[in-house]
Amino acid sequence: MLATLSTLAGGIGLFLLGMVLMSDSLKAMAGESLRTALARFTGQPFQAMLVGMGATAAVQSSTATTMATIGFVSAGLLTFQNSIGVIIGANIGSTSTGWIVALLGMKFSIASVAMPIIGLGALMKLLGRDKLALAGLALAGFGLIFVGIEYLQQAMAGMAGHVDLTRFSSPGWSTRLVLVIIGIVMTVLLQASSAALAATLAALSSGTIDFAQAAALVIGQNIGTTATALLAAAGGSASAKRTALVHLLFNLGSAVLAFFILLPLAVQLVRLWSLRHGSIDMALALAAFHTAFSVTGALVFLPQAQLLARLASRLVPESAPPGLRYLDASLQSVPALAIAAAEKTVCLGLSDTCHLLAQRLQGQPLASSKSGLSLEKLLAAVDDYLSRLPVPQSASDQQRLKHLLLLLDQTRVLRDDLQSIGHAEALRAQSSLWDLATRLAPPLERSAAWLADDSLPLREDVTEELRQVSEWVHEQQTAARRTVVEDAASYRITPAAALEQLTAQRWLERLAKHITRIAETLGEARALFHE
């Protein structure tokens, strides 16, 4: 029995090691393309579901896709509503592992073929560089998966004589519920539903358990896979917690449908097929059942994505100030996401500032800040957040950090302009100056909407409009200043009022120039990193 347990532990270990190597290597190879796909192609629920399916099938890990999705939501690169489709798609994509194991790992002894694959992968890792080395690691991981399956099959065959599961073979609901709980525990302990599924397939193929027991275990494993996401989101933002909660709600809902409807139906279909055709490939039947209940869950819950979003939002209220909701400490281990979160936070602060300035330049009273924070406090929070950021290793992350630091420097200059917003009152007293102010206000309003846009599109027309207005303000400044001086010389205004208006005119010119520079810097960054 000890030898059997040792073989079982080793088989699970090899399978997990293979999955980690293959998953991490494929994620690294996908790199920016995986982030771009999740951030850009999730506008519609069905579209988002396809992205989740594709990403999970590519990296062979629904947990990896779910964790990445939570990270993108926390960073503001992906809206919470769009993340629901990705989560549902990841659940369907995770069933590809079962098909791979059932079609290849259970059909013949692949260990003899896997060894050369591992050797070739190791050679590519040692001799290759960059993507070739990553491809080598992925290939070696792929080989290790099937070596692990070989050991799992041996261990399960040995356990058949020691493990008595007859007490769980009755068709009663309570017995199957116990198996569901065992499936949850298996996944939580192994921290990988793929490993738990492989062990279940091995046990089914060796005759240790029957189809009904295996199906109940798979239902539990599908619930257990949410544990990692829940733990990861525990200390995250409200959006991250909501995304993890939707993952749990969807998997629970799918499990209920599978347990009460699909499981009895699948058991009957397997029994009928066996009676008519004499035998059935149980591993393939289990893989098909896994896919069937994931697709059924998607068909039921994807149209209800908005309802899930409202429920999660009600259960997990937002506690952080709106201006700082994206500064999630859990993102700091991934510099690309942390930098994106800081950039999004600065953009929200700039949007609020542009809106306040436009209001004042149109003669409206100042409204309360949308973010509930002054630009000063927001900048201090971003500085503190970036001070805990690990050194970015990739050239792309370093370049993005440079753009962010330049944007922060220009935002500090705008903060000083905002502190002098009282000059707007002096502009109203001089028609030529007020004409300049009212010309600048509309593009400031459009800039505010652009900066607050969650989809972060590149709007060159906004930047160009600001540039033209800034140049026009600069061109008109000589004539405007001459008008002020002439009014003072003819005693239409006092010398003190003239000096105040001249100061306000210089403030307006600086403001137009600084806003234009910020738009240009942000436009360059968005062209590089968001398109």
Image: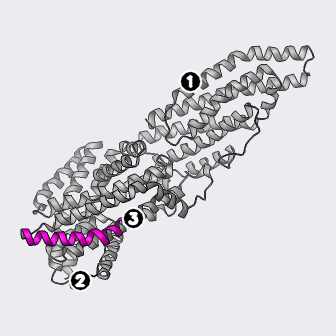
x and y, in percent, of residue 386 in the image: 56, 48
Q: Quadrant of residue 347?
A: top right
Is 415 positioned to the left or the right of 455 in the image? Answer: right
Q: Nearer the viewer, mark 2 or mark 1?
A: 2
Asked whether residue 237 appears in the rendered view, the answer is: no
x and y, in percent, of residue 359 in the image: 71, 35
Is 75 positioned to the left or the right of 488 in the image? Answer: left
Q: Which stretch appears magenta?
A: 252-276
Q: Secondary structure at mark 2?
A: loop
| Magenta run includes residue 441 | no
Q: How many labels were placed on the picture?
A: 3
Q: Amino acid at mark 2?
A: Ser
Q: Tell me whether circle 3 and circle 1 mark residues in contact (CB < 8 Å).
A: no
Residue that lies at the very extreme toward the left in this rendered image: 278
Up-down relation of residue 315 to residue 500 (above or below): below
> Dot 2, how many residues are within 10 Å of its Cα: few (below 14), some (14-19), or many (20+)?
few
Asked whether residue 362 appears in the rendered view, the answer is: yes
Q: Quadrant of residue 427?
A: top right
Q: Amino acid at mark 3?
A: Thr
**Earlier sequence position, callout 3 versus callout 2:** 2
Q: Secondary structure at mark 1?
A: helix
Residue labelled with disc 2: 170
The label number, if any, that marks residue 226 in the structure image: 3
Q: In front here: 46 or 408?
A: 46
x and y, in percent, of residue 207 in the image: 15, 76
- Look at the image and tell me in which quarter the C terminus lies: top left
**Earlier sequence position, callout 2 versus callout 1:** 2
Q: Secondary structure at mark 3?
A: helix
The label number, if any, that marks residue 464 in the structure image: 1
Q: In front here: 450 or 150?
A: 450
Is 70 positioned to the left or the right of 328 in the image? Answer: left
Q: Amino acid at mark 1?
A: Glu
